[in-house]
Image: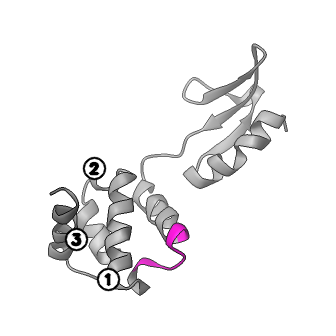
């Protein structure tokens, strides 16, 4: 694997994407270009499953699964999910509330406190 692809591997893993060989790069992939040559590509993950990947990122950052977090950490998780764009996804509030073991009203309350 090309050194550029190796260097990008942690980012690719964190986003749920995958690295593909230069010969397999398609128009929907992000070509990795080194000295004018395509050396590999990044195939972005489908939108389906994005919320689950974002939740996993936040759980990894906080070191615990969302339902196990104490209230201040849940507020921090909501802040981080908001920063990562989780709430632009359809049904995100409901799905995040379920994942955190709280009501959607509580999620809205935490979001409102952030945006005041």
Secondary structure of the residue carrying numbered label 3: helix
Q: Nearer the viewer, mark 1 or mark 2?
A: 1
* Magenta segment includes 62: yes
Neighbourhood count class around disc 2 (C-alpha, 10 Å): few under 14, some 14–19, many 20 upward:
few
Residue drawn 32% across the image and 66% down it: 78
Mark 3 or mark 1: name the one nearer the start of the chain. Answer: 1
> Marks 2 and 3, how far apart in space?
14 Å
Q: Nearer the viewer, mark 3 or mark 1?
A: 1
Mark 2 or mark 3: name the one nearer the start of the chain. Answer: 2
Mark 1 or mark 2: name the one nearer the start of the chain. Answer: 1
> Marks 1 and 2, how far apart in space?
23 Å
Neighbourhood count class around disc 3 (C-alpha, 10 Å): few under 14, some 14–19, many 20 upward:
many
User: What segment carries the magenta color?
Assistant: 60-66
The answer to which quarter of the image holds residue 27 is top right
Q: Which residue is mark 1?
A: 71
Q: Which residue is mark 2?
A: 88
Secondary structure of the residue carrying numbered label 1: helix
Neighbourhood count class around disc 1 (C-alpha, 10 Å): few under 14, some 14–19, many 20 upward:
few
Q: Which residue is mark 3?
A: 107
> Marks 3 and 1, how far apart in space?
11 Å
Residue drawn 76% across the image and 38% down it: 5
Q: Is residue 42 above or below residue 63?
A: above
Q: Residue furthest top?
A: 36
- Residues under numbered marks 1 and 2 in contact, where contact means CB atoms less than 8 Å apart: no
Q: Quadrant of the N terminus?
A: top right
Q: Quadrant of the C terminus?
A: bottom left
Which of 79/42 is in front?
79
Secondary structure of the residue carrying numbered label 2: helix
């Amino acid at each position: 694997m090309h050194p550029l692809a190796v260097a990008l591997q942690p980012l690719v893993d964190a986003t749920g994407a995958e690295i593909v060989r230069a010969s397999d790069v398609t128009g929907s992939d992000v070509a990795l270009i080194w000295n004018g040559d395509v050396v590999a590509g990044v195939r972005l993950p489908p939108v389906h499953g994005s919320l689950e990947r974002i939740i996993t990122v936040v759980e990894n950052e906080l070191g615990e699964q969302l339902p196990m977090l104490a209230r201040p950490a849940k507020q921090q998780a909501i802040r981080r999910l908001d920063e990562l764009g989780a709430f632009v996804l359809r049904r995100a509030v409901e799905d995040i509330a379920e994942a955190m073991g709280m009501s959607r009203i509580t999620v809205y309350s935490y979001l409102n406190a952030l945006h005041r």
